[in-house]
Image: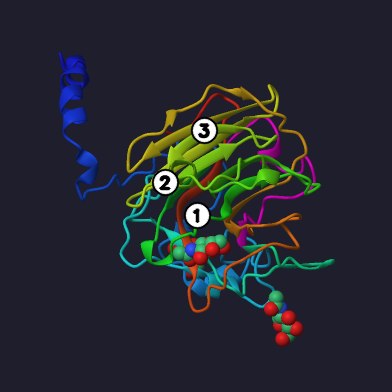
Amino acid sequence: MHFLLPILLLPFASSNPIRFHPSHHQTSPIKCPLIFDGRIPLNTSLLDFDSAATSPYSPQYVKGENLTWSSIIQFPPSYPPSRFDPPSNYKPFEVTISDRSLFRVSQGVQTGFRRAGLLLKDDKNPAGADAADKGVVTFHWSVSQDLARGMNLSHEYMNVWHERADYAGNQFSFLAGIVLKVDGGNGVDEKVEKESWKVVGRTNNVVFRTEILWRGWQNFAVVLDYDKSTLQVFYSAGDDPLKAVTEPIANDNTGGGQMQLGMAKKPTETETVVWDGYQEVLGNRMEGQRYGGVFVEDSSNGCISL
Ligand SMILES: *[C@@H]1O[C@H](CO)[C@@H](O)[C@H](O)[C@H]1NC(C)=O
Ligand SMILES: *[C@@H]1O[C@H](CO)[C@@H](O)[C@H](O)[C@H]1NC(C)=O
Ligand SMILES: *[C@@H]1O[C@H](CO)[C@@H](O)[C@H](O)[C@H]1NC(C)=O
């Protein structure tokens, strides 16, 4: 009668928070075909981020013009890995920004932003150029907070987004802090709004909000269905399996492009966001965001790793 076992165990599982137990799953919960794998194998060194031969990410983009990724990335000392990083194989990493995180484009240095954004090296920009721009695709990432390098949530941060190939917008974005009015926020300095993660769709419409946790991991997945033009969000905290937290919501997913993740700190008191506005001087300080479990999977057969 072992089929009864899961039912009998359920009350114990919910009243006994085993996620605080030090033992961690050793097998990967990734069940679907991988399109891009942004997880960081244990043997990766910081210098490996400076070469496409050893990094899953582009060594060039999108960062302060005189900085290397090996000076931007840090490995959190003895920090437990996230749900989708089996600890015997993968480790978390932290993306930092400082006063030097100034990106230069042909028009000049983007003084409005402080930014360090990783692009998966095989994620091609032109529309429809790769398997993550068609069918049904799930974008996964986990975040956790480094209290010594906390974000200043009076600012808006873009931490993960899928940017259109024409750079004129994003199919979705994952934001923290006070969202600027020009980005569809109300610009109000209200604790609850400020200290929450927001997943927004193509038109900056907020589709999911959850509080930023100061301890442990938070796991997010966004499903883009390019055929049905929908977006759906999955979420969990700690080591819990992901759960759907929205229905599939109508979203214009056209325009191709690339997923970017890291830190893009926007200015306050700004008109153009990119070229003007106020950025506090960080001095010797850095701000950082820890990431783990970054991967993109093919969900066209209905498969989603939870
Ligand atoms: C890490 O180990 C794997 C498996 O042995 C190897 O293929 C890979 O090249 C190594 N990576 C680095 C950055 O040394
Ligand atoms: C990078 O270094 C060059 C040469 O020193 C300097 O001219 C430029 O302003 C620096 N860029 C930034 C964004 O600080
Ligand atoms: C946070 O940012 C605001 C706006 O730039 C600034 O006025 C404030 O001093 C910063 N707070 C801290 C604690 O750094």
Q: Which SS class for mark 1?
A: loop
- Residue positioned 54% across, 70% down in the render: 72
Alpha-carbon span between mark 1 and mark 3:
18 Å
Q: Earlier in the sequence, mark 1 or mark 2?
A: 1
Crowd tier of the residue under label 1, counting other residues whose Cα lies within 10 Å: few below 14, some 14–19, many 20 or above = some
Q: Which mark is residue 212?
A: 2
From the image, state whether disc 1 or disc 3 is nearer to you.
1
Location of mark 3 (residue): 208
- Estimate the spatial distance between the alpha carbons at disc 2 and disc 3, rounded to whole Å: 13 Å
Q: For residue 153, which numbered disc appears in the image?
A: 1
Specify whether tag 1 is near ligand 3 (CB below 8 Å). Answer: yes
Residue 122 painted magenta: yes
Q: Is residue 185 magenta?
A: no
Q: Position of residue 197 (x, y in %)?
A: 49, 43
Return the residue nearer the eye: 101 or 90. 101
Say if mark 1 contacts mark 2, CB within 8 Å: yes
Tag 2 near tag 3, CB within 8 Å: no
Amino acid residing under circle 1: Leu
